[in-house]
Image: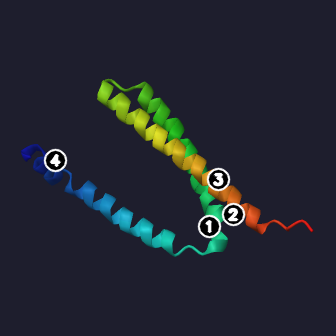
Amino acid sequence: MDSILNFLIDNKEAIFIIVLSVFLGFEVISNVPSVLHTPLMSGANAISGVIIIGGIILVGHASTSFEWIFGILALFLATLNVAGGYVVTDRMLEMFKKKKK
Protein backbone atom coordinates (compact mmCIF):
# COMPACT_ATOMS: atom_id res chain seq x y z
CA MET A 1 0.00 0.00 0.00
CA ASP A 2 2.87 2.35 0.79
CA SER A 3 4.45 1.76 -2.60
CA ILE A 4 1.19 2.71 -4.35
CA LEU A 5 0.90 5.90 -2.30
CA ASN A 6 4.53 6.77 -2.99
CA PHE A 7 3.97 6.19 -6.70
CA LEU A 8 0.91 8.46 -6.70
CA ILE A 9 2.74 11.18 -4.77
CA ASP A 10 5.83 11.00 -6.97
CA ASN A 11 3.82 11.13 -10.20
CA LYS A 12 0.99 13.48 -9.22
CA GLU A 13 1.65 15.87 -12.14
CA ALA A 14 1.52 13.08 -14.71
CA ILE A 15 -1.63 11.62 -13.16
CA PHE A 16 -3.25 15.06 -13.15
CA ILE A 17 -2.46 15.48 -16.86
CA ILE A 18 -3.90 12.06 -17.69
CA VAL A 19 -7.13 12.70 -15.74
CA LEU A 20 -7.49 16.17 -17.29
CA SER A 21 -6.90 14.67 -20.76
CA VAL A 22 -9.63 12.10 -20.20
CA PHE A 23 -12.17 14.78 -19.26
CA LEU A 24 -11.10 17.06 -22.11
CA GLY A 25 -11.20 14.22 -24.64
CA PHE A 26 -14.66 13.17 -23.51
CA GLU A 27 -15.93 16.74 -23.81
CA VAL A 28 -14.42 17.26 -27.26
CA ILE A 29 -15.62 13.92 -28.65
CA SER A 30 -19.15 14.27 -27.28
CA ASN A 31 -19.56 17.62 -29.08
CA VAL A 32 -18.41 16.49 -32.54
CA PRO A 33 -21.21 16.80 -35.10
CA SER A 34 -22.17 13.71 -37.09
CA VAL A 35 -20.91 15.21 -40.35
CA LEU A 36 -17.37 15.46 -38.99
CA HIS A 37 -17.34 12.04 -37.36
CA THR A 38 -16.15 10.04 -40.40
CA PRO A 39 -13.16 12.25 -41.31
CA LEU A 40 -12.07 12.46 -37.69
CA MET A 41 -12.40 8.70 -37.28
CA SER A 42 -10.25 8.12 -40.36
CA GLY A 43 -7.57 10.45 -39.01
CA ALA A 44 -7.65 8.78 -35.62
CA ASN A 45 -7.26 5.37 -37.28
CA ALA A 46 -4.18 6.59 -39.15
CA ILE A 47 -2.65 7.88 -35.90
CA SER A 48 -3.48 4.61 -34.15
CA GLY A 49 -1.73 2.70 -36.94
CA VAL A 50 1.43 4.68 -36.32
CA ILE A 51 1.10 4.00 -32.59
CA ILE A 52 0.85 0.27 -33.29
CA ILE A 53 4.11 0.35 -35.27
CA GLY A 54 5.80 2.18 -32.38
CA GLY A 55 4.37 -0.38 -29.97
CA ILE A 56 5.80 -3.24 -32.02
CA ILE A 57 9.22 -1.62 -31.86
CA LEU A 58 8.95 -1.14 -28.09
CA VAL A 59 7.81 -4.73 -27.52
CA GLY A 60 10.85 -5.84 -29.48
CA HIS A 61 13.03 -4.03 -26.94
CA ALA A 62 11.23 -5.37 -23.84
CA SER A 63 13.66 -6.64 -21.25
CA THR A 64 11.30 -8.47 -18.88
CA SER A 65 8.41 -10.82 -19.45
CA PHE A 66 6.10 -8.36 -17.64
CA GLU A 67 6.93 -5.63 -20.17
CA TRP A 68 6.50 -8.08 -23.05
CA ILE A 69 3.09 -9.33 -21.87
CA PHE A 70 1.83 -5.79 -21.18
CA GLY A 71 3.11 -4.65 -24.57
CA ILE A 72 1.43 -7.50 -26.43
CA LEU A 73 -1.85 -6.81 -24.58
CA ALA A 74 -1.61 -3.12 -25.49
CA LEU A 75 -0.90 -3.98 -29.13
CA PHE A 76 -3.89 -6.33 -29.22
CA LEU A 77 -6.21 -3.68 -27.81
CA ALA A 78 -4.83 -1.01 -30.17
CA THR A 79 -5.35 -3.34 -33.14
CA LEU A 80 -8.94 -3.94 -32.05
CA ASN A 81 -9.40 -0.18 -31.84
CA VAL A 82 -8.09 0.35 -35.38
CA ALA A 83 -10.15 -2.50 -36.85
CA GLY A 84 -13.30 -1.33 -35.08
CA GLY A 85 -12.68 2.23 -36.24
CA TYR A 86 -12.45 1.13 -39.85
CA VAL A 87 -15.67 -0.88 -39.53
CA VAL A 88 -17.50 2.12 -38.07
CA THR A 89 -16.07 4.43 -40.75
CA ASP A 90 -17.16 2.03 -43.49
CA ARG A 91 -20.68 1.84 -42.08
CA MET A 92 -20.95 5.62 -41.89
CA LEU A 93 -19.70 6.02 -45.47
CA GLU A 94 -22.34 3.52 -46.61
CA MET A 95 -25.02 5.83 -45.19
CA PHE A 96 -23.92 8.63 -47.54
CA LYS A 97 -23.98 6.56 -50.71
CA LYS A 98 -26.91 6.83 -53.07
CA LYS A 99 -29.36 3.96 -52.78
CA LYS A 100 -29.90 1.75 -55.82
CA LYS A 101 -33.39 1.83 -57.30
Secondary-structure class at tag 3: helix
Earlier residue among tags 3 and 2:
3
Which residue is drawn at the image coordinates 37% and 63% (left, top)? 22
Residue 70: x %, y % from top left? 36, 35
Q: Nearer the viewer, residue 70 or 84?
A: 84
User: Which is nearer the N-term, disc 1 or disc 3?
Assistant: 1
Asked if residue 97 is positioned above or below residue 70 in the image, the reply reads below
The residue singled out by tag 4 in the image is 7
Can you tell which of label 1 and label 4 is closer to the viewer? 1
Q: Which residue is mark 3?
A: 87
Real-space Cα separation, disc 1 to disc 3, in angstroms: 13 Å
Query: In terms of secondary structure, where does tag 1 sit?
Result: helix
10 Å crowding of disc 4: few (<14), some (14-19), many (20+): few
The image position of residue 43, as x and y in percent, is 61, 56
Report helix, strand or loop for mark 4: helix
**Residue under circle 2?**
92
Query: Do the CB atoms of the residues marked 4 and 2 lie less than 8 Å apart?
Result: no
C-alpha separation, residue under disc 4 versus residue under disc 2: 43 Å
Q: Are marks 1 and 4 in contact (CB under 8 Å)?
A: no
